Amino acid sequence: VQLQASGGGLVQAGGSLRLSCRLSGSILGYDSVGWFRQAPGKEREGVSCISRSGDSTYYSDSVKGRFTISRDTGKNTVYLQMNSLKPDDTAVYYCVAAFYPPNPSNWADFDTWGQGTLVTVSS
Protein backbone atom coordinates (compact mmCIF):
# COMPACT_ATOMS: atom_id res chain seq x y z
CA VAL A 1 0.00 0.00 0.00
CA GLN A 2 1.12 3.53 -0.71
CA LEU A 3 -0.12 6.56 1.19
CA GLN A 4 -0.30 10.07 -0.20
CA ALA A 5 -0.97 12.75 2.39
CA SER A 6 -2.02 16.30 1.57
CA GLY A 7 -3.80 19.27 3.04
CA GLY A 8 -1.26 20.76 5.38
CA GLY A 9 -0.58 24.47 5.53
CA LEU A 10 -0.45 27.58 7.64
CA VAL A 11 -3.49 28.55 9.69
CA GLN A 12 -4.19 30.88 12.58
CA ALA A 13 -5.08 29.56 16.00
CA GLY A 14 -8.74 28.67 16.13
CA GLY A 15 -8.83 27.84 12.45
CA SER A 16 -9.40 24.56 10.64
CA LEU A 17 -7.64 22.31 8.16
CA ARG A 18 -8.54 19.00 6.57
CA LEU A 19 -5.83 16.49 5.85
CA SER A 20 -6.35 13.80 3.23
CA CYS A 21 -4.62 10.46 2.86
CA ARG A 22 -5.14 8.60 -0.40
CA LEU A 23 -4.40 4.89 -0.41
CA SER A 24 -3.18 3.13 -3.51
CA GLY A 25 -1.52 -0.13 -4.45
CA SER A 26 -2.22 -3.25 -2.41
CA ILE A 27 -4.82 -1.70 -0.17
CA LEU A 28 -7.14 -4.66 0.24
CA GLY A 29 -5.41 -6.15 3.24
CA TYR A 30 -5.01 -3.22 5.59
CA ASP A 31 -6.75 -3.16 8.97
CA SER A 32 -6.48 0.46 10.09
CA VAL A 33 -5.35 3.85 8.85
CA GLY A 34 -4.23 6.61 11.14
CA TRP A 35 -2.34 9.82 11.63
CA PHE A 36 0.78 10.46 13.64
CA ARG A 37 2.48 13.77 14.15
CA GLN A 38 5.90 14.91 15.15
CA ALA A 39 6.92 18.38 16.20
CA PRO A 40 10.55 19.54 16.50
CA GLY A 41 12.05 18.28 19.72
CA LYS A 42 8.97 16.26 20.63
CA GLU A 43 8.14 12.57 20.53
CA ARG A 44 6.06 11.08 17.77
CA GLU A 45 2.40 11.10 18.79
CA GLY A 46 -0.45 8.93 17.57
CA VAL A 47 -3.24 11.40 16.87
CA SER A 48 -6.08 9.39 15.42
CA CYS A 49 -6.92 6.07 13.81
CA ILE A 50 -9.86 4.46 12.04
CA SER A 51 -10.56 0.82 11.34
CA ARG A 52 -11.23 -0.48 7.87
CA SER A 53 -14.92 -0.84 8.61
CA GLY A 54 -15.11 2.62 10.13
CA ASP A 55 -16.67 1.17 13.27
CA SER A 56 -13.70 1.89 15.48
CA THR A 57 -11.94 5.21 15.90
CA TYR A 58 -9.24 6.48 18.22
CA TYR A 59 -8.21 9.98 19.27
CA SER A 60 -5.42 11.07 21.52
CA ASP A 61 -6.47 13.11 24.52
CA SER A 62 -4.76 16.16 23.06
CA VAL A 63 -7.08 16.27 20.03
CA LYS A 64 -10.27 14.64 21.30
CA GLY A 65 -13.28 16.83 20.61
CA ARG A 66 -11.41 18.92 18.02
CA PHE A 67 -10.31 16.43 15.36
CA THR A 68 -12.49 13.99 13.43
CA ILE A 69 -11.25 11.08 11.33
CA SER A 70 -13.34 9.64 8.53
CA ARG A 71 -12.94 7.59 5.39
CA ASP A 72 -14.42 7.49 1.91
CA THR A 73 -14.05 3.93 0.70
CA GLY A 74 -15.09 4.85 -2.83
CA LYS A 75 -12.18 7.26 -3.07
CA ASN A 76 -9.78 5.12 -1.01
CA THR A 77 -9.17 8.20 1.11
CA VAL A 78 -9.01 8.88 4.83
CA TYR A 79 -9.57 12.40 6.14
CA LEU A 80 -8.58 14.18 9.31
CA GLN A 81 -10.72 17.23 9.97
CA MET A 82 -8.90 19.49 12.41
CA ASN A 83 -10.86 22.25 14.10
CA SER A 84 -10.02 24.74 16.83
CA LEU A 85 -6.37 24.41 16.00
CA LYS A 86 -3.78 25.47 18.54
CA PRO A 87 -0.11 26.38 18.15
CA ASP A 88 0.68 23.10 19.94
CA ASP A 89 -0.82 21.27 16.95
CA THR A 90 2.06 22.49 14.80
CA ALA A 91 3.86 19.41 13.49
CA VAL A 92 4.51 17.23 10.50
CA TYR A 93 1.54 14.90 10.14
CA TYR A 94 2.06 11.42 8.74
CA CYS A 95 -0.58 9.10 7.35
CA VAL A 96 0.03 5.49 8.41
CA ALA A 97 -1.50 2.08 7.76
CA ALA A 98 -1.49 -1.17 9.71
CA PHE A 99 -2.21 -4.63 8.38
CA TYR A 100 -2.97 -6.03 11.82
CA PRO A 101 -5.05 -4.39 14.57
CA PRO A 102 -2.69 -1.82 16.04
CA ASN A 103 -2.19 -0.06 19.30
CA PRO A 104 -3.08 3.35 17.85
CA SER A 105 -0.54 5.13 20.03
CA ASN A 106 2.34 2.82 19.10
CA TRP A 107 3.97 3.94 15.87
CA ALA A 108 5.80 0.62 15.55
CA ASP A 109 2.48 -1.16 14.96
CA PHE A 110 1.99 0.63 11.65
CA ASP A 111 3.59 -1.03 8.66
CA THR A 112 3.38 1.69 6.09
CA TRP A 113 4.07 5.42 6.34
CA GLY A 114 3.33 8.11 3.83
CA GLN A 115 5.31 11.28 3.39
CA GLY A 116 4.52 13.97 5.93
CA THR A 117 2.48 17.10 5.47
CA LEU A 118 3.37 20.16 7.53
CA VAL A 119 0.74 21.87 9.64
CA THR A 120 1.70 25.23 11.14
CA VAL A 121 -0.64 27.00 13.53
CA SER A 122 0.24 30.60 14.30
CA SER A 123 -0.77 32.31 17.52
Image: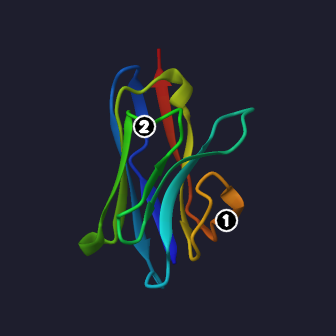
Residue 71 percent location from the top left of the image:
32, 62
Q: Please, which residue is most extreme toward the top here?
A: 123
Residue picked out by circle 2: 9
Count of marks overlaid on the render: 2
Q: Nearer the viewer, residue 112 or 4?
A: 112
Of 104 and 27, nearer the camera is 104
Type of amino acid at the residue the image marks with label 2: Gly
Q: Residues within 10 Å of mark 2 (few under 14, many from 20)?
A: some
Mark 2: secondary structure: strand
Q: Do residues under tags 2 and 1 come within 8 Å of each other at their CB atoms?
A: no
Q: Earlier in the sequence, mark 2 or mark 1?
A: 2
Residue 28 screen position, x and y as percent:
43, 85
Query: Farthest residue toward the left?
Result: 74
Q: Which of the labelled discs sits on residue 89, or is there none?
A: none
Return the x and y of residue 95 as percentages of the image width and height. Answer: 51, 58
The figure's colour scheme reads rainbow
What's the residue at 35%, 54% (across, down)?
Answer: 79
Q: Is 56 or 15 nearer to us in this picture?
A: 56
Task: Name, please, the residue furthest toward the front.
Answer: 55
Q: Which image quadrant is residue 51 in? A: bottom left
Residue located 35% across and 38% down the image: 17
Task: Give the labeled residue for mark 1.
Answer: 109
Q: Is 29 displayed left or right of 19 in the figure?
A: right
- The answer to whether 84 is drawn above or below residue 21 in the figure is above
Label 2 – label 1 distance at C-alpha: 27 Å
* 89 relative to 13, above or below: below
User: How packed is label 1: few (under 14 Cα within 10 Å), some, or many (20 or more)?
Assistant: some
Residue type at tag 1 = Asp
SS for callout 1: helix
Q: Nearer the viewer, mark 2 or mark 1?
A: 1
